[in-house]
Amino acid sequence: MSVYRNFNQECLDKQYNVRGGIPGYQAIFDRWARESRDFRATHPVRENLAYGDDPKQALDFFPAISRGRPLLVFIHGGYWQSLDKSDFSYVAAPYLRHDINVAVVNYRLAPDVPMAAIVRDNQEALAWLYRQAEVLGFDGNRIFVSGHSAGGHLTAAMAGTNWEQFGVPAGLVKGGCAISGLYDLEPIRLCYLNQVVRLTPADVAAYSPVHHLPTTKLPMILTVGGDESDEYHRLQAQYAALLREQGVETEVVVQARGHHFDAVDYLGNAEGELAAAVLRMIAAAS
């Protein structure tokens, strides 16, 4: 019996079960945590800056050498229910080398809070950063957002946010990089993940980036691991087409190979094409 498109329940679940397709994924998580811990030990960082009252509503800020430089925000993945900002400090390396500030954001997770709160947390984090630009020493008019998996979804959601409702400029986000993003939440609602995420049809309509495209002409970079499931590739192709129809400058960085967790590593690889594309995007807005 078809549950979504041409997938029965088992096949749909397999399309989105990224851990199931990556033997030894825990070793990857352990490496991220270890490399990020080492990175924080050797780079200046302001840890656990609170943008809200909950302990999860906090971020780590890695300052550039010079004042008034751009800011790249990173939003972690984990299917809205796991992982932590402390696992991803290492992605800051290529950008700090180019005198670009980096902020790595935490947010509340499912099932403790619904999707509305998860999206709102990230919006509040970006609005808070904008208001703290002078204190933290970066250029509040050059804020860029990146994220992986669920963070890719949230990056796209930030790009499509009406920022004026937060009392900040409509063009708060100057560009985005979404890695292995989940741009339509309907298959998530229908697969095994919804046992924890608990999406409703109203959530799908309200928080799917395919239904809320950017209204400003910010550039967007999209990428997905070459070996990821067909659904991840389909979601990216669909979102890229919609962005281009909207007149949004959209660059797709092709990864010939690589699984879901390799994809985010490329953001922190100074020698790779993804980091180069992000650096070009930031430089173009300077």
Image (spheres, grey):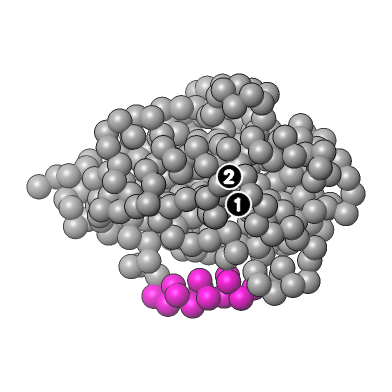
Residue at (53, 61) in percent of width and height = 84
Residue that numbered label 1 is attached to: 58
Q: Residues within 10 Å of mark 1 (few under 14, many from 20)?
A: many
Magenta residues, dominant SS class: helix
Q: Relative to 77, say whether 209 is above or below.
A: above
Residue 269 colored magenta?
no
Q: Position of residue 108 (x, y in %)?
A: 47, 50
Residue that numbered label 2 is attached to: 52
User: What element does badge 1 sit on?
Assistant: strand
Q: Residues within 10 Å of mark 2 (few under 14, many from 20)?
A: some
Q: Relative to 151, say whether 262 is above or below.
A: below
Residue at (34, 29) in percent of width and height = 205
Three-letter amino acid code at the position of disc 2: Gly
Residue at (77, 39) in percent of width and height = 133
Q: CA distance from mark 1 to mark 2?
A: 7 Å
Q: Are marks 1 and 2 in contact (CB under 8 Å)?
A: yes
In the picture, measured across the screen, residue 251 lies left or right of residue 41, that is left
Q: Position of residue 209 (x, y in %)?
A: 45, 34
List the single residue furthest toward the left.
1
* Residue span colored magenta: 23-35
- Please tell me which residue lies in front, 95 or 200: 200
